[in-house]
């Protein structure tokens, strides 16, 4: 039996919510899975990553499928798979492509086995593979998510913001592996910096849940990761400033970057173009996408 799943790309952090906030975007990877009783792996890839994604046992979709098979005790029954991927989520740009692959694999495997696992189990398995929950949670649940992890157990609160916006995603013409973007971060943080992020994050959630856009004014401020990552993305703060000047609700680094994202309502195109111009002034070429929240 062949199952098909569709998983959204995601943007993590939303500025201050480092490793905790996430949002699902209307940009999808489609996955078809047929579990095989005999050994052997057949992987077909269309779209993003068709040249770079491994088609061997190292493939992250397959590794995620295997986690589910082992977890439910079916690893001896199904030793191989046929996988067809049709990817729209760009690779290594900060739109959660790895989370999309992981969630695609575990969701498809779970469905192929008759859904023995609940979403809570899928969240746990996906978080264990990815290392943090902020991309996998919205990839599983859609919408906007707040996630915590305690003693290895992730928990997610999912909601739909009451402020309407589109996501303007500006994609610069270079890759930035998450690992490199995490290596520039300090192990310890200042109390004053922590306070900035606690306040912004709390304010942002309150604003989105109440629908009070004026409370977003300081809600995108972040002192924990973007200041350190700025050196990896030429002109990052100029691009944020250009977006705000053009009337965006806020702008931030999408996940670990290098994509920059602004939330805008009504003026998406002019915000996108202003962001592109600011990038160009810093000698960075870019393209852009205007996405909706995936619910
Ligand atoms: N929260 C993660 C980070 C998202 O900023 O490093 C990227 O995977």
Image (spheres, rainbow, N blue to C red):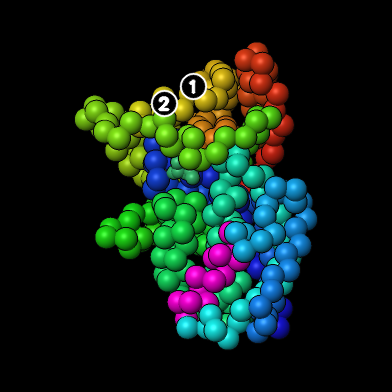
Residue 234 falls in image quadrant: top right
> At which x and y percent is residue 286?
70, 28
> At which x and y percent is residue 142?
54, 58
Horizontal side, residue 265 vs residue 128: left or right = right
Residue 139 falls in image quadrant: bottom right
> At which x and y percent is residue 242?
58, 20
- Tag on residue 160? none
Q: Residue at x 54, y 71 (%)?
A: 66
Instruction: Determine if residue 165 is in view.
Output: no
Q: How many marks?
A: 2
Instruction: Determine if residue 81 is in view.
Output: yes
Secondary structure state at the residue bearing disc 1: helix
Check whether the beta carbons of the residues at disc 1 and disc 2 lie within 8 A of each other: yes
Residue receiving disc 1:
231
Q: Nearer the viewer, residue 97 or 245?
A: 97
Instruction: Identify the image quadrant of the N terminus.
Output: bottom right
Q: Is residue 147 magenta?
A: no
Q: Nearer the viewer, residue 172 or 37?
A: 37
- Tag on residue 228? 2
Q: Residue at x 69, y 59 (%)?
A: 55
Task: Please determine whether, in this image, residue 262 is positioned above or below residue 142.
Answer: above
* Residue stretch in magenta: 60-72
Instruction: Identify the image quadrant of the C terminus.
Output: bottom right
Horizontal side, residue 129 vs residue 190: left or right = right
Secondary structure state at the residue bearing disc 2: helix
């Amino acid at each position: 039996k062949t199952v098909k799943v569709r998983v959204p790309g995601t943007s993590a952090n939303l500025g201050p919510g480092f490793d905790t906030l996430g949002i699902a975007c209307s940009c999808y990877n489609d996955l078809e899975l047929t579990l095989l009783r005999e050994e052997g792996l057949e992987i077909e890839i269309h779209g993003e990553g068709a040249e770079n994604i491994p088609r061997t046992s190292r493939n992250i979709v397959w590794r995620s499928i295997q986690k589910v098979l082992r977890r439910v005790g079916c690893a001896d029954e199904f030793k191989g798979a046929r996988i067809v991927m049709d990817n729209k989520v760009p690779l290594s740009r900060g739109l959660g492509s790895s989370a999309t692959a992981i969630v695609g694999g575990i969701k498809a495997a779970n469905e192929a086995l008759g859904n023995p696992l609940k979403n809570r189990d899928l969240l746990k398995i996906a978080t264990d593979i990815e290392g943090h929950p902020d991309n996998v949670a919205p990839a599983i649940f859609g919408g906007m998510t707040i996630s915590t992890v305690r003693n290895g157990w992730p928990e997610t609160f999912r909601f739909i913001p009451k402020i309407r916006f589109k996501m303007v995603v500006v994609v610069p013409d270079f890759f930035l592996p998450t690992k490199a973007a995490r290596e520039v971060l300090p192990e310890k943080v200042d109390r004053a910096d922590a306070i900035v992020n606690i306040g912004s994050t709390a304010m942002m959630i309150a604003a989105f849940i109440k629908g009070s856009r004026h409370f977003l004014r300081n809600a995108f401020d972040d002192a924990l990761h973007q200041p350190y990552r700025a050196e990896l993305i030429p002109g990052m703060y100029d691009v944020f400033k250009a977006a705000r000047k053009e009337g965006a609700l806020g702008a931030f680094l999408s996940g670990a970057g290098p994509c920059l994202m602004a939330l805008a309502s009504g003026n998406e195109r002019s915000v996108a173009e202003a962001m592109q111009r600011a990038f160009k002034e810093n000698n960075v070429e870019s393209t852009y996408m205007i996405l909706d929240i995936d619910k």
